[in-house]
């Protein structure tokens, strides 16, 4: 499970906006916006949640669930030791997004 706060923190760690995350996860921007606007756990289509979590993992984010081993407990996110760079996309105008 992932919370809206974890999702926002994960995007901040990666330095990407909602549009970029939508492209990486093959979801729409409004879907990302709805997920981030929630309080607590994100609920929704299981396929969409899996796409989101897989995209974050591929970009180098590790989600820390409640009760998982961490130095201070609680939920969170962290970058893996050797996190790959988020893939770059080029728009129709040839400019990097």
Image (cartoon, helix red, strand yellow):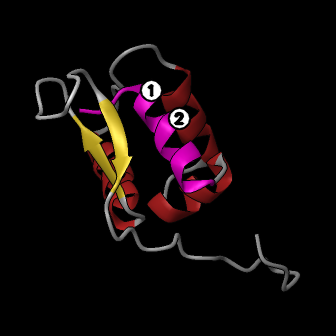
State whether residue 8 is above or below residue 62: above
Q: Quadrant of residue 20?
A: bottom right
> How many angstroms separate mark 2 from mark 1 (CA)?
6 Å
Q: Which residue is mark 2?
A: 8
Q: Which residue is mark 1?
A: 4
Indicate the position of residue 60 as horizontal and vertical percent values.
Answer: 38, 62
Q: Is residue 28 left or right of residue 75?
A: right
Q: Is residue 87 left or right of residue 95?
A: left
Highlighted range, magenta: 1-15
State whether residue 56 is above or below residue 97: above
Indicate the position of residue 49 as horizontal and vertical percent values.
Answer: 32, 43
At horizontal 24% and vertical 21% (from top left) the residue drawn is 74
Q: Nearer the viewer, residue 11 or 80?
A: 80
Q: Quadrant of residue 93?
A: bottom right
Judged from this view, the residue extending furthest toward the front is 71
Q: Is residue 80 left or right of residue 89?
A: left
Q: Nearer the viewer, residue 45 or 15?
A: 15
Q: Quadrant of the C terminus?
A: bottom right
Label 1 sits on a secondary structure element that is helix
Please identify the dominant SS of the magenta region: helix
Indicate the position of residue 40 as horizontal and vertical percent values.
Answer: 37, 15
Label 2 sits on a secondary structure element that is helix
Q: Quadrant of residue 3?
A: top left
Q: Give the total number of marks visible in the rendering.
A: 2
Q: What label does residue 53 carry, if any? A: none
Q: Are marks 2 and 1 in contact (CB under 8 Å)?
A: yes
At horizontal 36% and vertical 40% (from top left) the residue drawn is 77
At horizontal 39% and vertical 68% (from top left) the residue drawn is 83
């Amino acid at each position: 499970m992932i919370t809206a706060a974890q999702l926002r923190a994960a995007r901040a760690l990666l330095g990407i906006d909602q549009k970029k995350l939508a492209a990486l996860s093959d979801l729409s921007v409004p879907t990302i916006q709805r997920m981030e606007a929630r309080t607590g756990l994100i609920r929704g289509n299981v396929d969409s949640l899996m796409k989101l979590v897989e995209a974050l993992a591929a970009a180098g984010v590790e989600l820390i669930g409640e009760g998982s081993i961490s130095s201070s407990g609680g939920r969170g996110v962290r970058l893996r030791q050797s996190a790959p760079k988020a893939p770059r996309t080029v728009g129709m105008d040839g400019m990097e997004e």
